Image (tube, rainbow, N blue to C red):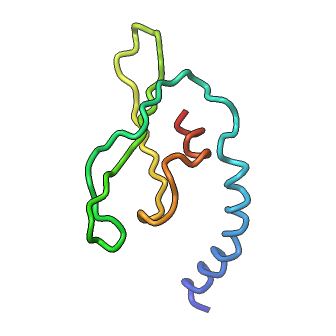
Amino acid sequence: MSRYVRWFALLSMLLPVLAWADDLLLPRDEPTYAVRTTNAIVYGTGAGQGGASSEPLILDLYEPLIDDPNVEALPVVILIHGGGFVGGSRSDSRLVTMAE
């Protein structure tokens, strides 16, 4: 059996476990920090389904509210829901929880 076939077999056995672990690993609690949320910011346009029309590309911005005068800069995390512009949503509750 080739190495690729073994890796494929191992991956196919692990996928159900990873899907189950997804529910365990993603945060479910309240946000750790207070955040200011700005919803539905249009940052560009893209081809819609079928490619004929132009659709707005929209994002939500989550900014931590930190009252520490010593903090000059914060890291940036970009969460992309995926779905190839066919499925998924920026308002998926699990993504919102992670962003918060």
**Residue at x 45%, y 9% (from the top left corner):** 68
**Residue at x 61%, y 45% (from the top left corner):** 93
Q: Tag count in the figure?
A: 0
Considering only vertical position in the picture, is 40 above or below 56?
above
Q: For the C terminus, which image quadrant?
A: top right
- Outermost residue on the top side: it is 69
- Outermost residue on the bottom side: it is 1
The quarter of the displayed image where residue 18 is located: bottom right
Direction from residue 90 to residue 74 in the image, left or right = left
Most foreground residue, 62 or 54:
54
Where does residue 47 sit, x and y in percent of width and height?
28, 64
Most foreground residue, 57 or 54:
54
Where does residue 41 sit, x and y in percent of width and height?
35, 39
**Residue at x 39%, y 43% (from the top left corner):** 59
Where does residue 14 sit, x and y in percent of width and height?
69, 69
Q: For the N terminus, which image quadrant?
A: bottom right
**Residue at x 31%, y 57% (from the top left corner):** 55
- Outermost residue on the front side: it is 53
Most foreground residue, 97 or 20:
97
